[in-house]
Amino acid sequence: MSGYFTEDTSVDAVNSRMGPDVSPRLAKVMAALVRHLHEFAKEVELTEQEWEIGIDFLTRTGGICSPERQEFILLSDTLGFSMLVDAINNRRPEGATENTVFGPFHVEGAPVRAMGDSISLDGKGEPCVYEGRVLDLDGRPIAGAKIDVWCDNEDGFYDVQQPDVQPKWNNRGVFLTGPDGRYSFVGIKPVSYPIPDDGPVGQMLAALGRHPFRPAHMHYLVTAPGFEKLVTHTFVGGDPYLDSDTVFGVKKSLIARFEAVEGSGTRWRSPFDFVLTPAGGN
Amino acid sequence: MSGYFTEDTSVDAVNSRMGPDVSPRLAKVMAALVRHLHEFAKEVELTEQEWEIGIDFLTRTGGICSPERQEFILLSDTLGFSMLVDAINNRRPEGATENTVFGPFHVEGAPVRAMGDSISLDGKGEPCVYEGRVLDLDGRPIAGAKIDVWCDNEDGFYDVQQPDVQPKWNNRGVFLTGPDGRYSFVGIKPVSYPIPDDGPVGQMLAALGRHPFRPAHMHYLVTAPGFEKLVTHTFVGGDPYLDSDTVFGVKKSLIARFEAVEGSGTRWRSPFDFVLTPAGGN
């Protein structure tokens, strides 16, 4: 018998209530969650009015969710929680390409294209050649790696955000490496854009004096048999939001060079090698 | 410049992002919330699948909320968070009546009744005389105290949960004390009941091996000029759920006697004195 609830005994009062047949992992996670939530309230001596504000915030966050909008993920992202979970679950050895957040805009089933092809279907934006290799930790090329790429268009929107404006699969494509591990495709230099900030999360960011922007980036999902899945971006070097990505996705090692190609109008080249870790290997 | 986000620096990376003009209280509360959330994820090494389960749980909790149902409050209640906030904000000197959760079933504007009147309008349940005094910390009667009471009916439902079944204001009433500080009314002996458990919170309780019941209780909101508002219940002594109230509302000092009155069929008497603290006095 745990005794009745008091300020001092609150954590035990709640956690001792769990039944004997609860999954050990669930019991561990919930006990820790309850303890940290209670410690938070005690530390700041949360007022009843603040509690009401919190309940209202969560309720409005739930209310704006729809099949097209996931405000709780946005909340997790903007509190650095998504990146933390990503970091905890994707610790990699020195030299391996780092993970970053997956984001909500990946679409399964993008067209497989030949090396060198363009993924830009609307003719907008500044063309950029993306090229490099997919390697293992010893620097050997990985053949048969699947590189799934996607980015926003010149106006800062992914194709799925503008189904009536952009061609389907605009700025998306899948490339498969040959024996040399090399990849190459033509895309555009992506642009920075704000996350949806017309809801509760946008209000939170404003109250915290934070902007809603993400620095320009190209998304990559790189998979190969026998290797860990790599979910990452390359970021456009020099972007003004590199130091203040609103979802904390930037890692120094993921900032790529974007070199102006001479004699060809506005045209860029961005070299980047991806280094994969063996599956089950960390 | 805080540096890029890493597992080690995650808390600072997020909290250093706040702008210079943020309300100091908001900054303090959010910084603590972020720190505790991150510490939680690190401590249990939250997996990506568990993160997805959490996002889905919050989304479904938001999805079931409506003007008639507040699942986030239910979540806060069942995690002991509501009671903790209540405890933090209502510390009282020895001898004062303790607070407990307000609950979602209070209705403003219940009829003011004369002392001794009945609040049971449907003729169901076991009649019970509630009586006692409203006192200050020195044991002196408080005149002009307003006692707002409400409870469920014999079937475990408040009138507002059954607008087509129960008479309006069934088992509710407001009483005003005279110079002797005494109150007295006839109600019913309340019954234990489950909180709404057909949603995400009910699923959580089931997964944790917990039942959804609250022990039988009579709600009180006692106010008097110059005194702190008292939000509390009296609990029915002997109720089987006293040790396991699903919202952790029970305090030993709030368990009341329910004495069988002889020679009158099933009829009860429950004496309880309320002791108020001076306003602004703790």
Image: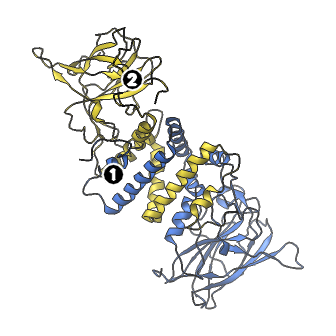
Chain colours: A blue, B yellow
Q: Residue at x 61, y 91 (%)?
A: A179
Q: Quadrant of residue B46?
A: bottom left
The crowding category of the residue bearing disc 2, from other C-alpha atoms within 10 Å (few below 14, some 14 to 19, many at least 20), is many
Residue picked out by circle 2 = B276
Chain bearing tag 1 is: A
In terms of depth relative to the viewer, which is nearer, A219 or A172? A219
SS category of the residue bearing label 1: helix
Q: Quick check: can you spot residue B270? A: yes
Q: Residue at x 43, y 48 (%)?
A: A38
Instruction: Have a look at marks 2 and 1 and say if they share a chain.
Output: no
Q: Residue at x 44, y 57 (%)?
A: B53
Q: Residue at x 40, y 51 (%)?
A: A34
In terms of depth relative to the viewer, which is nearer, B56 or B40? B40
In terms of depth relative to the viewer, which is nearer, B60 or A187? B60
The crowding category of the residue bearing disc 1, from other C-alpha atoms within 10 Å (few below 14, some 14 to 19, many at least 20), is many
> Which amino acid does the dot numbered 1 rest on?
Asn
- Horizontal and vertical percent position of residue B77: 39, 41
Q: Is residue B139 above or below residue A71?
A: above
> Which amino acid does the dot numbered 2 rest on?
Leu
Name the side, left or right, on which B172 lies relative to B240: right
- Horizontal and vertical percent position of residue A76: 55, 56
Q: Is residue A210 above or below residue B149?
A: below
- Horizontal and vertical percent position of residue B176: 38, 12
| Numbered circle sitting on residue A15 | 1
Q: Quadrant of residue B80?
A: top left
Spatial separation of the CA atoms under disc 2 and disc 1: 32 Å
- Horizontal and vertical percent position of residue B173: 36, 16
